[in-house]
Image: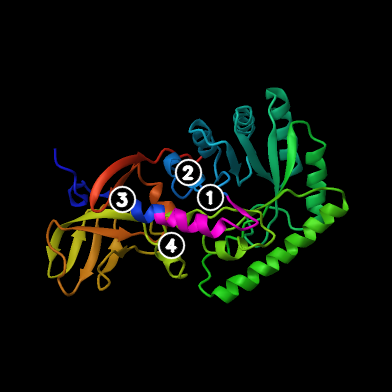
């Protein structure tokens, strides 16, 4: 039996270059090795327990996720330390959360509401579990979270006095800064946030409350937030794959994730592929063509990609690779990864948490 060449994989297909993936994981592990903060990478990027275990084997303390369904997948896969960096408020979900926390995994969740704290406590008490809690602070995202030290103190006191809950610290994600291309601008705005978090921590300390964790940090800011600042956990996720938007920041990571596509029609000046926006996220822009800097994707339709090919570099039935503009949004369109090394198909991994939106 002959090995399967990358070019023999049926398209469209989501590819991982294993050498680059492993190198990205190692680069992040080396950066974090002697830092005060620990890496807790985000699962929403890859949604694959195999990759999560690879990250933990290289020093990550646990895994971050965004959805309860993702936490259930992680716990079932043997991940022992899971943070849901989001609010879980529906009654049925609150009890599902308490159920996961009754397993041998440590489960932490974000809160910003006193009623939610009461609901979590009630569910934990009924099921007999322990839920660890981070109070979310809005540091510029304008999504969830509270904004003042007094609001934080109020919620923390309620957590401390609630059965089944343990106050762990603060959730503070600076996602509005991670794509800023100017490093100095990113750096100074992160420092301003760190000062604000320091004020909140000082108020809590004055009230006799210890803050064990301050969790946040993204791929675009990992080398700032993770460089011995106030953050104790870094939630960077996209570094394992990268994409065209993050590539603009000049980070040390490379593209390990691509979409394999086939040229199904060729005409003078343009080519059509079998990969449209149903297999490639475009909310952050069009993808780029790997190894062909002069080619430009004019548009992606549902099932087709139109490529401007003025030099007629592409040929009918040729296989090419897209580099997506947003790795996380693209991954959620697939059921599996085709993992290649040195141009050969090595293994196939399921995207186990694909579609876990609840």
> If you read the primary sequence from the N terminus, does the residue marked by circle 1 or circle 3 appear first?
3
**Left or right, residue 164 beside residue 228:** right
Question: For numbered disc 1, what is the local secondary structure?
Answer: loop
Depicted 310 relative to depicted 240: above or below: below
Q: Earlier in the sequence, mark 2 or mark 4?
A: 2
Between the C-alphas of marks 1 and 3, the distance is 21 Å
Task: Please tell me which residue is depicted at 82% across the width and 58% down the height of the picture.
Answer: 202
Identified at 70% across, 42% down, the residue is 133
Pinpoint residue 335: horizontal percent, then vertical percent.
35, 41
Mark 2 and mark 1 residues within 8 Å of each other at the beta carbon: yes
Q: Which residue is mark 2?
A: 52
Query: In this figure, which residue is indicated by the disc labeled 3?
Result: 15
The residue where tag 4 is placed is 253
What is the spatial separation of the Cα atoms under label 2 and label 1, in whole angstroms?
A: 8 Å
Residue 309, picture quadrant: bottom left
Q: Secondary structure at mark 3?
A: strand
Q: Nearer the viewer, mark 2 or mark 3?
A: 2
Cα gap from disc 2 to disc 3, whole angstroms: 17 Å
The magenta-colored residue range is 23-39
User: Which residue corresponds to the image point at 66% horizontal and 57% vertical from the top-left?
Assistant: 231
Circle 1 is placed at which residue position? 41
**Which residue shows up at 58% across the image and 40% down it?**
82
Relative height, residue 155 to residue 232 (above, below): above
Q: Is residue 101 magenta?
A: no
């Amino acid at each position: 039996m002959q090995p399967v060449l990358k070019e023999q994989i049926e398209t469209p297909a989501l590819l991982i270059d294993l050498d680059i993936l492993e190198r990205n994981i190692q680069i992040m592990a080396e950066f974090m090795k002697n830092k005060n903060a620990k890496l807790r990478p985000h699962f929403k990027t890859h949604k694959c327990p195999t990759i999560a275990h690879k990250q933990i084997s290289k020093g990550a303390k646990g895994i971050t996720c965004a959805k309860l369904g993702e936490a259930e997948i992680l716990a079932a896969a043997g991940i022992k330390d899971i943070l849901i960096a989001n609010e879980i408020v529906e009654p049925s979900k609150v009890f599902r959360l308490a159920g996961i926390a009754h397993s041998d995994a440590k489960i932490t969740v974000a809160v910003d509401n006193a009623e939610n704290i009461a609901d979590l406590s009630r569910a934990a008490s009924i099921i007999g579990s322990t839920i660890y809690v981070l109070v979310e602070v809005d540091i510029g995202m304008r999504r969830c979270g509270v904004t003042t030290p007094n609001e934080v103190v109020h919620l923390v006191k309620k957590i401390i006095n609630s059965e089944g809950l343990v106050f762990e610290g603060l959730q503070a994600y600076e996602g509005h800064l991670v794509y800023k291309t100017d490093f100095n601008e990113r750096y100074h705005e992160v420092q301003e946030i760190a000062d604000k978090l320091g004020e909140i921590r000082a108020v809590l300390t004055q009230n006799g409350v210890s803050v064990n964790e301050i969790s946040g940090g993204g791929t675009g800011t990992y080398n700032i937030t993770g460089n011995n600042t106030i953050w104790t956990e870094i939630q960077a996720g996209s570094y394992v794959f990268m994409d065209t938007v993050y590539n603009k920041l000049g980070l040390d990571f490379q593209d390990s994730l691509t979409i394999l596509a086939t040229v199904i029609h060729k005409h003078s000046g343009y080519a059509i592929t079998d990969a449209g926006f149903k297999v490639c996220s475009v909310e952050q822009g069009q993808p780029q063509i790997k190894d062909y800097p002069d080619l430009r994707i004019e548009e992606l339709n549902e099932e087709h990609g139109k490529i401007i090919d003025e030099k007629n570099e592409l040929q009918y039935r040729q296989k090419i690779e897209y580099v997506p503009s947003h790795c996380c949004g693209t991954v959620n369109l697939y059921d599996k990864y085709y993992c290649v090394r040195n141009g050969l198909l090595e293994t196939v991994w399921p995207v186990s948490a694909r579609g876990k939106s609840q």
